[in-house]
Amino acid sequence: DTIDVTKLVNSIIDRYELVSNRDMIVFHRDIPDQTTFATVDRDKLIQVLDNILSNAVKYSPEGGRISILLGEGEKHFKISVSDEGVGIPKESLPQIFERFYRVDKARSRKLGGTGLGLAIAKQIVVAHGGSIWVDSEWNVGTTITLTLPYSVEKVVGFNG
Ligand code: ATP
Ligand code: MG
């Protein structure tokens, strides 16, 4: 189906804004007024953004700022989520999209989770012909960026 990506992204942020209120997390939107339409699996896109935003919230300090950017390219649109959280050490960056991988087991256990969120997000994005990557600095913050084609001909290699 063709969906309104702008509306979808805004509504997911609205939801996180409500639940993150007590942690005083501030959401900043860099989202154009002009609507971005795309023919993608709506539920899967929600799942991807849920995983990324839940991480941003989970690994942010009280009062941290989370910035969400939506941008349009020629064939792809781009969504990035930046936080001012704990960050990811350089040596862990290549592994964070692997199943069950979690940085700092002790800290992660306290925060909860299975280490599957980003692996699932990557599987979905790649199946849609897009890409996803991380930029992060330990103790500074993390940015997760993904690109997806406006139109997915056929979703390949995804079962679930
Ligand atoms: P789950 O998503 O299954 O609940 P999780 O959040 O631990 O568990 P992933 O979302 O796959 O797992 O993330 C893998 C690991 O990457 C996390 O455990 C965490 O160490 C690190 N990570 C992911 N996003 C961030 C972020 N925004 N800031 C800091 N570390 C992050
Ligand atoms: Mg997660």
Image (spheres, grey):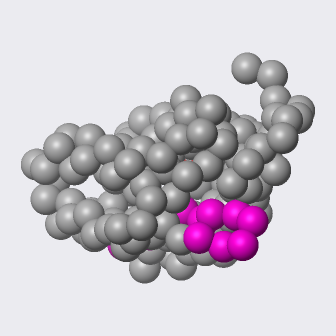
Q: Nearer the viewer, residue 32 or 88?
A: 32
Residue 110 figure quarter: top left
Rendered location of residue 66, percent (x, y): 33, 66
Q: Nearer the viewer, residue 100 or 118?
A: 118
Can residue 85 be seen here? The reply is no
Labels in figure, total = 0
Can residue 129 be seen here? The reply is yes
- The residue most toward the right is 157
Q: Identify the residue at image location x=66%, y=43%.
A: 39
Q: Identify the residue at image location x=17%, y=44%.
A: 18
Rendered location of residue 131, percent (x, y): 75, 59
Q: Which residues are magenta?
A: 72-86
Rendered location of residue 71, percent (x, y): 54, 71
Q: Nearer the viewer, residue 95 or 69?
A: 69
Residue 63 figure quarter: bottom left
In the rendered view, tell whether residue 67 sits above or below residue 129: below
Left or right relative to 44: residue 25: left
Q: Identify the residue at image location x=63%, y=63%.
A: 77
In the rendered view, tell whether residue 56 sits above or below residue 14: below
Q: Is residue 29 magenta?
A: no
For the C terminus, the quadrant is top right
In the rendered view, tell whether residue 71 sits above or below residue 13: below
For the N terminus, the quadrant is top right
Q: Main secondary structure of the magenta part?
A: strand
Q: Is residue 75 magenta?
A: yes
Left or right relative to 67: residue 99: right
Rendered location of residue 102, percent (x, y): 60, 47
Left or right relative to 65: residue 103: right
- The residue most toward the top is 160
Q: Nearer the viewer, residue 25 or 18?
A: 18
